[in-house]
Image (spheres, rainbow, N blue to C red):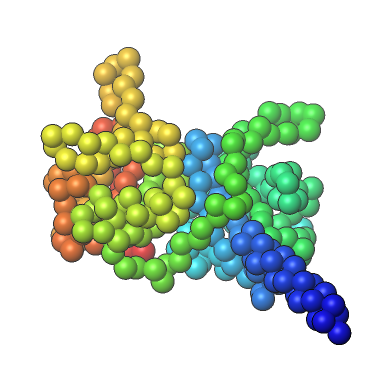
Amino acid sequence: MKKALLVLVAVVAVAVVAIGLFVALGGDKDDPNRITFLIEDDKGVYFWIAGSGETADKAFLDAAEKSAVDVASSDTPSGLFVTGIAGLEQTFDYSYYWTLQIYDGEEWKASDVGISSLKSSEHDYLAFVYSQSLGPPDYSVVLPEMPSVEDAKVWSKDSRSGVLFTIQSDSGMYFHVNGLGGTVFDAFSSACEEYKIPFEESSGMSGKGIKSIFDKGTTQDKQGNYTYWIQYVPKDGEWASSPSMMGNLDSKDYGRMFVMYAAYGNVPSLSIDV
């Protein structure tokens, strides 16, 4: 009898560990129709969103709405065709477009069907990657380095505590995160840690700030123009240049910040409202 009980306990323990691992890897089958989506541009900047629906297109639109991400699409005979995500749209000649990728448990592979043809219950992770077409005969694409699905962390538009940051790549793609801390720098650091954003800080006599995000740091072209992570804060309902380094700004005075990788002189085109 004791042996039988020990065997039963062992089986239950293994089952619990297996379930814990499954959930940790994103397979939340409390909602079998939930999918986590990786969104990545051709510059190596990425973020994650998650949503639910019986088919992957419905789950994707639900995910975009929950994370305050704009989507441009059209309805076709084969279903939803995505043409733009988070401000980054395909080019007119299709030389750049959003490709749908499927994670098979080990690696990412191009989907051979449209997103409307995928059943959500059969997929834990999908990705839209902004890719350059290599042309005929197969229109294959070269994928950028993809982050691990184990690092997937989804921001929800309901998460508004601390400082809310909008981060925009030089591609034009944007996403939102928020973080807590006494200074805006502390809040940004915590947001990067929480959402697994590659970040390196700068520190000097003028204060703490950003050295690089997604391994993108300050560069200078032959004409002497600098490209770097420009920072803006709200002022009178519009974006204005940050008055100081992040480390010198008190979070209680700055609940929003726009951080964009661009050449000096560029200004945000996105609304302050999220």
**Does residue 210 lie above or below 2 as drawn?**
above
As drawn, the residue found furthest toward the top would be 222
214 or 92: nearer the eye?
214
Horizontal arrangement in the rendering, residue 272 relative to residue 88 (left or right):
left
Q: Residue at x 27, y 36 (%)?
A: 202
| Residue plotted at (25% across, 49% down) | 185
In the displayed structure, does residue 194 sit left or right of residue 223? right
Q: Quadrant of the C terminus?
A: bottom left
The residue most toward the bottom is 1
Q: Is residue 24 above or below residue 16?
A: above
The x, y position of residue 98, in whole percent, is 61, 45
Residue 180 seen from this side: yes
Which sits in the foreground, 213 or 186? Answer: 186
Residue at image position (42%, 67%) is 157
Where is residue 161? Give x, y as percent.
Answer: 32, 68
Please give left or right for residue 208 compared with residue 106 in the image.
left
Q: Position of residue 199 (x, y in %)?
A: 38, 42
Counting from the top left corner in percent of width and height, residue 209 is at 25, 41
The answer to whether residue 88 is visible is no
